Image (tube, rainbow, N blue to C red):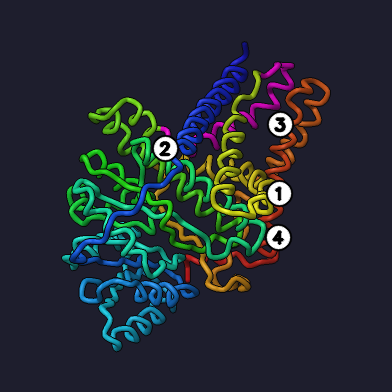
Amino acid sequence: MPIVSWIYTLAVLGAAVMGVNMTLLLVLGLIYQLPRPLASPPTVWPSVLVQLPIFNERYVIERLIDAAVALDYPADQLTIQVLDDSTDETSALARMRVAYHQARGRRVTYLHRTERTGFKAGALANGLTISPAEYVTVFDADFVPPPDFLRLTIPEFYADPQLGMVQARWSHLNADQNVLTRAQALILDGYFMIYQVARHRAGFLTNFNGSAGVWRTATIESAGGWQGDTLAEDLDLSYRAQLKGWRMSYLPQVTAPAELPVSILAFKRQQARWATGSFQVLRKLGPDLLQARLPLMSKIQGLFQLAGYLPFPLMFISMIGSLPMVLLHQHAPLNWGWLSLISLGLDILLGQVLLYKDWPKRLLSFPVLFMVGIGLTLTNTVATWEAFFGRNHKFIRTPKFSSLNQRETTYILPVDWTTWGELLLALYAFATGFVALERVPTMAPFIFIQAIGFGFTAALGFWQSGGLTRPAKSPESA
């Protein structure tokens, strides 16, 4: 058998293994759907620090600060930190809003760094050095925490002295803004309603999602604090804490709404950062996880979670290998790698059924999600490759906006090389598909589906960026 056949087969089988595990989590997520009641409130509320890390967020900074100040919690036990690394007028807006609330007696402080050492992790660590609070909660710039957030989450710590973190479910501020935000809402709902529930209730390792969670300060300290050597500081700290013996909790009935990326270019940035970060954590903590005194299944599930973006490079390999397989008249093995997409589709379906009465209408966006999921293959393959070999360690923000009708101007993202790459891959897949119709017809349908996915993602990128006439100004230079 030619080496290309071996490579293609291994990629397909690897994707199939990931799909089998997703199916297992899907079953567990259904078994454990019945939520347990929330803990009773304490007689005395502890001190809490609310940290708001921001970088160039002019459109949402005031909304974020106002929502944090509106939290329903004893004022003498609540401190809010605005951790600003901005290089644009966001800083002036933040200072004015902080001064506004300070004049009304609220405990809000403003901290500005001129160097983004450690990125978000560095900002959070810097803020903790000047706060004696027993608990700390983090909200990214795109979130609007509900007033009762702390009163619902803090009591959980009193029921379990080894509980280190409580994570809430993300909901959405702008799910209906466009076809892309509707598609993103589907995948996030499925993740939070199925996979997070399964990992938590089955006793597997789980994670803080970077926002809308509460930490016991002692847990952060005992796990080594926030560390900026990966782009997934949330996942990194979560695993270090659990390897130290702390437990994590997830409350799907407590929600915090956030804004979804409105453009495919912004969404690709976000996904690439998450893919990079997860593989960086795998490199960093994988050996410790294997040697930890944990049940075997917990170790296996932990590795699967840290390698969660692996299906993308496996899909990329199988797609590139399709043409040689066709030209060699090789009858490819049944592509069980599509089991990952089938499991993901069921996860999305169940997430919508569990959350919404109008779920059939919401599922109309699934074809868009399916095509974009295929189109993300190039971006996420590059991200995982660079992370695996230690080449990518630059935090690139995702632009956010407060108005559902606002057209991006200042933070416009230009078409980058990955959009051109997606276009070329679409042409490659279409050509391969037509060759497959003659030589190996059984492979043609899968290849044409990939071609459509890459073509749709590339077209969406060109359209949302204004095409080729848009000046290529990076928002990071603002």
Query: Residue placed at 72% from the left, 37% from the top?
Result: 449
Q: Residue 456 carries which label?
A: 1
Disc nearer the start of the sequence (1/4): 1
Q: Which mark is residue 305?
A: 2
Query: Residue placed at 66% from the left, 49% from the top?
Result: 363
Residue to which mark 3 is pinned:
446
In magenta stretch: residue 307: yes
Q: How crowded is mark 2: few (under 14 residues within 10 Å), some or many (20 or more)?
A: many
Disc nearer the start of the sequence (2/4): 2
In the displayed structure image, the side of residue 331 where residue 231 appears, left or right:
left
Q: What stretch is highlighted in magenta?
A: 304-332
Q: Nearer the viewer, mark 2 or mark 4?
A: 2
The answer for how far apart the CA atoms under marks 1 and 3 are is 16 Å
Question: Residue 19 at x, y = what percent?
Answer: 54, 30
Disc nearer the start of the sequence (3/4): 3
**What amino acid does circle 1 point to?**
Phe
**What amino acid does circle 4 point to?**
Trp
The answer for how far apart the CA atoms under marks 1 and 4 are is 10 Å
In the displayed structure image, the side of residue 328 where residue 217 appears, left or right:
left
Towards the viewer: 154 or 219: 154
Residue to which mark 4 is pinned:
463
Query: Residue placed at 80% from the left, 20% from the top?
Result: 439
Question: Residue 185 at x, y = what percent?
Answer: 57, 54
Towards the viewer: 81 or 459: 81
In the displayed structure image, the side of residue 262 where residue 235 appears, left or right:
left
Q: Nearer the viewer, mark 3 or mark 4?
A: 3
Quadrant assignment, res 283: top left
**What amino acid does circle 3 point to?**
Phe
